[in-house]
Image: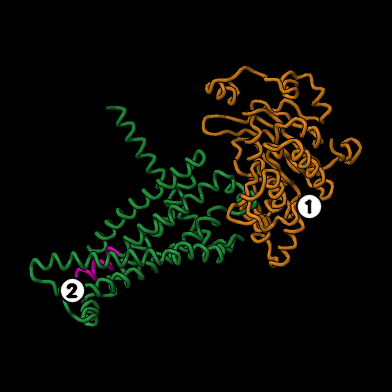
Chain colours: A green, B orange
Amino acid sequence: MLRYVEQAGRRTLDGLDQMGRASSLLGESLFWTFLGRRWRQPVRVRAVFAQMMQIGIAAVPITTLLATAIGVMLAVQSLYSLGLFGAQSFAHVGISLSLTREFAPLIVGILIAGRSGSALAARISTMSINQEVDALRAIGINPVRFLVAPALLAMLIMLPSLTMWANLVALSAAGLFVSASLDVSLAAYISNTMSVLVPNDVLHGLGKSILFAVLIVIVAALNGSRVTGGAEGVGRVTTRSVVHSISAIVLADMIFGYLATQ
Amino acid sequence: MSTLPQTQTSAPRAAAVEVRGLCAGYGDTQVLHDLDLEVREGEIMVIMGGSGSGKSTLLRLLIGLELPRVGTLSLLGHETARLGPVEMLDLRRKLGVAFQGGALFSSMSVAENIKLPLREHTKLDEATMDIMARLKLEVVNLSGFGDLMPAELSGGMLKRAAIARAIVMDPRLLFFDEPSAGLDPIVSAALDELILRLREAMGMTIVVVTHEVESAFKIADRITILDRGRILEIGTPEEVRNSSNERIQNMLNRRSAEEPLEPAAYLRRLTGNA
């Protein structure tokens, strides 16, 4: 019994330690982003654009595919469930609100956590093992400024952008399905959707995506920097990073959703 | 041995590296105990020791990757603990480090690796940086290899490329971590020649951490022997070779100085409580 209490205590302390490190890493990233130039260590625009390409532009096809699938899936389920009450004509309400406030940011967040968060964790852990992070410090380059800050900036720009794109694609896909199923024009569906959606709904989703962006980068960087062992260690921290960031995204989504609707 | 004029025949030179009362370790384990060490400007100092002697920890302290628990460390006349971030950055520009495995950035070509310090610390244009990268590649006999990726280079070439990156800012102080490790004797000898040539041509102070006896005696002006985190001897290669210390003689003659150790005994040895 005592052993379990000890274990729980140790894990709690470790968790608190990780949260402290995460806050410190976030603070340091923001410091270099905004004050790096003053300390002669600016965050390079070229590095940010390179990350934006990897995180955002390269993810457009898969985001489009998933957003289409989510849009159609929501339309199918909404028509089915509302059809039980003969209220299929109100499908656009549930679809548009749940997509913009919940599904688009969540799916994009999970997708990017798996795609770019894992890549960042693998990159940092591989560089740590190969002494490349030591080499950066020896050259006089702060590793957080060089590796984490550009990824954070790029993620903060691209995740909300991808979320907006996912909103557009998913709403269009759902609209096409609903209009075909209910035999109403697409223009009428769009008009109905626009009458339901208010800017706050979209901002709610974008707020989440900003939060998810921070979580993905910080969790990935933190896990990547804690690598031990060789190639096996890289695999372990990469997997752990994806699991941690998806868990963090889902939990943060729930808390954000609750707080924002109070 | 190198061709640097002997200390006794030239004017006293300032200390490029000065270590006083240095203690360091990890967690509960103390690795270095009360070290005093001085490397004079223009000198090649080789730090030797067996596994677990603390030489890698000492190197990490010297290049600023670890902080000492006790004691002071001065590089090029600056006590590192007293430097602010900007001053430390200025100091780092005068240092070069060639890591054991090269530590080239695998996502960049060899030339991009060499240009990185220039890109980060100078305002040189791309054409000038290209010229400087080519020049440094020539110095290390890697002309024409700039466009290759690090994964395409052999072990010896990786180390040469790492040296080119380390000297691209024309540092005053250059550190090598096990330059000969994992190389065949011919490549290893060529690297020793390169280290000597760098000192001759660029007048750098060079600190080499190695366990390769032949290499150490070939390049060193002075040798520091570390054992269990303490300095056993500092002297010229002749002085070290003629040392009456049995542990040093064992090391030089590649005899095992002790019985195989269990992990617990190894840790005790590290902490100096053997």
Picture quadrant of residue B221: top right
The stretch in magenta equals A91-103
Quadrant containing the C terminus of chain B in the rendered view:
top right
Query: What's the residue type where badge 2 is placed?
Result: Ser
Outermost residue to the left: A85
Question: Is residue B41 left or right of A261 when viewed as pictured?
Answer: right
Residue A200, quarter of the rendered image:
bottom left
* Residue displayed at 58% across by 33% down: B25
Q: Quadrant of residue A2?
A: top left
Chain letter, disc 2 residue: A
Disc 2: which residue: A181
In the rendered image of this protein, does residue B224 appear above or below residue B81? above
Mark 2 surroundings: few (<14), some (14-19) or many (≥20) residues within 10 A? few
Find disc 1 in the rendering and name its residue: B139
In space, the residues marked 1 and 2 are separated at their CA atoms by 73 Å
Q: Residue at x 78, y 52 (%)?
A: B139
| Type of amino acid under label 1 | Val
